[in-house]
Amino acid sequence: MILYSHRLHGVLHQMVNELGLDLIISDDNSPVSLSDNEATLNDVSAGLNIEMKKLAGANGSVLYRFRRRT
């Protein structure tokens, strides 16, 4: 599965930069790991000056937290 960077860009920009919210995404219910798209997640968040942190979730799932850089 491919994560579309332009859609991620729009969501991160609006949720994190404009509204100032933290955003956490998980691959808990997905057949594909978000780790497969880590490069895209990293590139988009870096381009928007958003801090991205990878976290381990329950049952081997992966979580990514995005928040505004301070």
Image: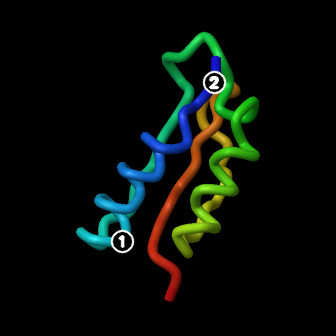
Side (left or right) of 17 relative to 30: left
> Camera-side residue: 49 or 20?
49
Name which residue lies at 27% across and 71% down.
18
Where in the figure is residue 27, as x and y percent of width and height?
Answer: 56, 27
The type of residue carrying mark 1 is Asn
- Residue highlighted by disc 1: 17
- Spot the residue most to the left: 19
- Spot the residue most to the top: 31
Instruction: Give me the C-alpha separation between circle 2 and circle 1.
Output: 24 Å
Name which residue lies at 36% across and 65% down.
16
Q: Which mark is residue 7?
A: none
User: Total number of numbered labels?
Assistant: 2
- Residue highlighted by disc 2: 2
Tag 1 secondary structure: helix
- Spot the residue most to the front: 6
Question: Crowding near pointer 1: few (<14 within 10 Å), some, many (20+)?
Answer: some
Where in the figure is residue 23, as x and y percent of width and height?
Answer: 40, 54
Location of residue 12 with respect to 33 vertically, above or below: below
Where in the figure is residue 48, as x and y percent of width and height?
Answer: 52, 69
- Spot the residue most to the bottom: 70
Location of residue 10 with respect to 47 vertically, above or below: above
Where in the figure is residue 53, as x and y percent of width and height?
Answer: 64, 60
The type of residue carrying mark 2 is Ile
